Amino acid sequence: MQDFFELSLSAAASGCIYGLVALAYLLMIRPTGIINFAVGEWAMLGAFGGFLLLTKFEWPYPVGMAVVVALMLAVGWGTERLAVRPLMEKRAPLLAPILALLGMLVIFREAISVSFPPDPHPVPYAFEIQHQKYFIIAVSALVFAGFWFFFEKTLWGRSFEAVSLNRRAAALMGINLSRVTALSFAGGAGAAGLAGLLVSPNVSAHYLMGVPLAIQGFTALVIGGVGRVEGALLGGMLLAFAEQLTTRYAPIPSGYAQGVPLLFLMIFLLVRPTGLLRARAA
Amino acid sequence: MRLAAWLGAFAVLAALPFFLGSYHNDVYRKLLLWITLALGYNFLFGICGQVAFSHFAFYGIGAYSVVILLFQVGLPLPLAITLGVVICVALALAVAIPATRLEGFYLALVTLALAQLFIVVLNEGGAVTGGTGGIAGYRLPAVFGWRIAGPAYTVVIVFLMLATLALLLRLDGSWFGRACRAVRDNPEAAAAMGVDVARTKVIVFTLTSALAGVAGMVYAFVDNTVNPPIFGLDNAFLILFMVIVGGAGRHAGAVIGAILLFLLPFWLSPLVGHHHQLVFGLFVLAAILFQPKGLIGLWDRFSR
């Protein structure tokens, strides 16, 4: 029983991380249709922000965390400005910004690999090591509650929804499309950077940490469905529990747990391609 | 006449390795293999419009399959090659059939996960894959009592590259090539014209993955070693970048992109060390923002 509780707790904590990465994808996909593979590198940037501010400069945790998230919002906004907006204005096909963001992915990763030595960089826990899981769950719950409230209850959130339902109609209603796009990228980078900061005490900041997180995040997204914020969290939880149960009870090497996302992806694409939660009809 | 041109190209490219030293021969072989890979990927990405990150993984799957089948299982060479192709085709079908049922970029998602899993399987595969060290110290079995090595093996690679190019040019000029371009440019219109969109995507993905697998089999005897770091995700991105920088959808573009991005690190390394990837990322971003038709598009503009 104790063992199962421990397992559930650590699965819930990783589920929150996957959920935050899935949320980052979702924030950008919903209004623009762009799938941004660079979210994993954003998470990596968040982790390195944590290393720099918290480990190296020894800032107090809340200040460092706030500054990391603020910087990530700026990174997301800048990424959109540089790699997405010029293409949207040229009315380039949707593939163009996706490829430009892949270029950005490599630029982010290599910029970090140039600036830091290649070994893992430690990031401190928020409180004590044994409380980190609770901290991850609490922060993620707050973030998801905030985004849920934003999309469901505020006029601004509704305007995001309107853009995802029909860009043209939303623009004709006076919604500023480029502002919505910029904000969705800023929010996506914020969520992904937060995920990276929260997970980094366990895995250490490393310039190659992005791709596995990106894969787990979009698997969570496909499981939960791109329709709703709750779906991202649900998908993350399901994926994390499946991974933890596989490594705990199945007699296979632990490295193969990385195969669980691929298996889930295939099953969901075959059986339920819309994900578990459908978008609510407007 | 066209046959004469092909034979001439083959003669020139195949004669070249006999005048090169062993170092330049090695560079030349790898350049030819990258061109082969870029040509195949260009058909999938540039002509059919499908983004996949598994092209280089299939190169690795081909290389590992043929080595394992030859030296761990002990099959004869023709059987090992045939079975290796069967493995690539089966895997490609298993991935593509669910992923292409839907609109959107699911093929990119699934193949990224596949490419990542491939590396995990290689590292965890124990005695079968040789783990992190891979498999080394084998030699190409004799074919009809003749051991092909040195510049003669380079001729095999030249043949592979030209055969791939000929096959893709032929397909591109046929009904199938036009169907692929239609799927890329407007899937709805393609479907309305009677093109089975999902099936076209599955066929192109499977075909190009199998071509990558065959190139991998040839590669396995270039360095006579296969190990996980060779087949990492960096190179999956690199193929995509070659095609984008050279000019997606054009065979000449794929060739130019492959040559440029393969040779660039040799000139860049005194300047930036191992960080030439950063330069590639900037190239790709610049290409997409300012020159979506790639270098071949620039060439078109100036030659007019």
Image: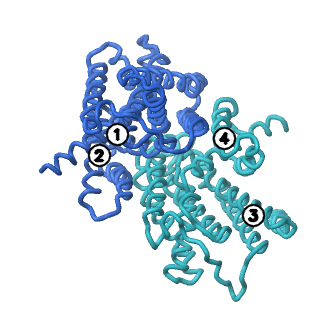
Task: Estimate how packed mark 3 is, as few (under 14), some (14 to 19) or many (20 or more) residues with alpha carbons within 10 Å.
Answer: some
Q: Which chain is cyan?
A: B
Tell me if B69 is positioned left or right of B43 in this view.
Answer: left
Please tell me which residue lies in front, A220 or B82.
A220
- Crowding at dot 1, Cα within 10 Å, few <14 / some 14-19 / many 20+, comes out as many
Residue designated by label 3: B26
Q: Which residue is mark 4?
A: B280
Distance of label 3 from label 1 (alpha carbons)? 43 Å
Q: Which mark is residue A240?
A: 2
Say which chain tag 1 marks.
A
Mark pair 3, 2: CA separation: 45 Å
Chain bearing tag 3 is B
Q: Which chain does blue denote in the image? A: A
Looking at the image, which is closer to me, A254 or A183?
A254
Question: Secondary structure beneath disc 4?
Answer: helix
Q: Amino acid at mark 3?
A: Asp
* Chain assignment, label 4: B
Image quarter of residue B166:
bottom right
Label 4 vs label 2: CA separation? 35 Å
> Dot 1 lies on which element?
helix
The quarter of the displayed image where residue B12 is located:
bottom right
Dot 3: what SS? helix
Are marks 3 and 1 in one subunit? no
Mark 1 vs 2: CB contact within 8 A: yes
**Residue under the point 55% across and 62% down:** B60
Q: Quadrant of the C terminus of chain B?
A: top right
Q: Residue at x 64, y 82 (%)?
A: B141
Residue highlighted by disc 1 = A18
